[in-house]
Amino acid sequence: MREKPADARGALSNTSAMDSGLYQLAISLPGRTLLTPGKLGTFGLAGGLYVYTGIARRNLRARLARHARKDKRLRWHVDYLLQYGIIKRVFIYSVETFTECELSLLILETLEGETPIPRFGASDCRCRGHLVKCPVGKGVREIEKAVSTIEGSYSVGPEDFK
């Protein structure tokens, strides 16, 4: 897993190079939280680390900057989680690499996680959901290790989008 690229071809400051992409947000939830993401219902989430998988078909940088802001209109399921959670790391992939569903499933299986909210982030597909709860003891390093072999992927901190 590479850190944010420094060259103009992949740098975050070059929005044309980052127009689209798959991304995963490693989100720390400090404690038990009741969450009502849109019309999915109300769920009790334990504190810990979660991985949300999303895609931006255009304007990836703007999407990630929006996720990093606390003050925003609640639009996507992940917006509801981010009211309480803290983004620890962002993983970025080419859209040619996987689908959202495949990438979420990869993390779910590799980390032996669970899907805490059925259909979370998956209103436009048929998979079980795009939110994975990491088991206790597995953190950002384990996520980085799980995705380190994906060519062209890299990770950045949330401060890169503010």
Image (cartoon, rainbow, N blue to C red):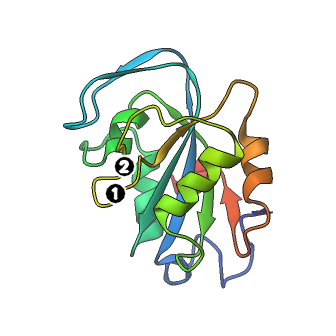
Q: Is residue 155 left or right of residue 70?
A: right
Q: Quadrant of the N terminus?
A: bottom right
Q: Is residue 95 visible?
A: yes
Above or below, comparing residue 50 to residue 129 in the picture: above
Q: Is residue 89 visible?
A: no
Q: Residue at x 67, y 29 (%)?
A: 135
Closer to the camera: disc 2 or disc 1? 1
Give the quadrant of residue 71. Answer: top left
Q: Which residue is mark 2?
A: 121
Q: Residue at x 49, y 31 (%)?
A: 85
Above or below, comparing residue 134 to residue 103 in the picture: above
Q: Work out whether mark 2 precedes mark 1 in sequence or the reverse, and give the earlier one.
A: 2
In percent of width and height, residue 88 lies at: 63, 40
Amino acid type indicated by mark 2: Gly
In percent of width and height, residue 45 lies at: 45, 22
Residue nearer the viewer, 138 or 10: 138
Crowd band around label 1 with a 10 angstrom C-alpha radius: few (<14), some (14–19), many (20+): few
Q: Residue at x 75, y 73 (%)?
A: 6
Q: Is residue 160 left or right of residue 33?
A: right
Give the quadrant of residue 17. Answer: bottom right
Above or below, comparing residue 124 to residue 98 in the picture: above
In percent of width and height, residue 7 lies at: 73, 80
Give the quadrant of residue 120. Answer: top left
Q: Which residue is mark 1?
A: 126
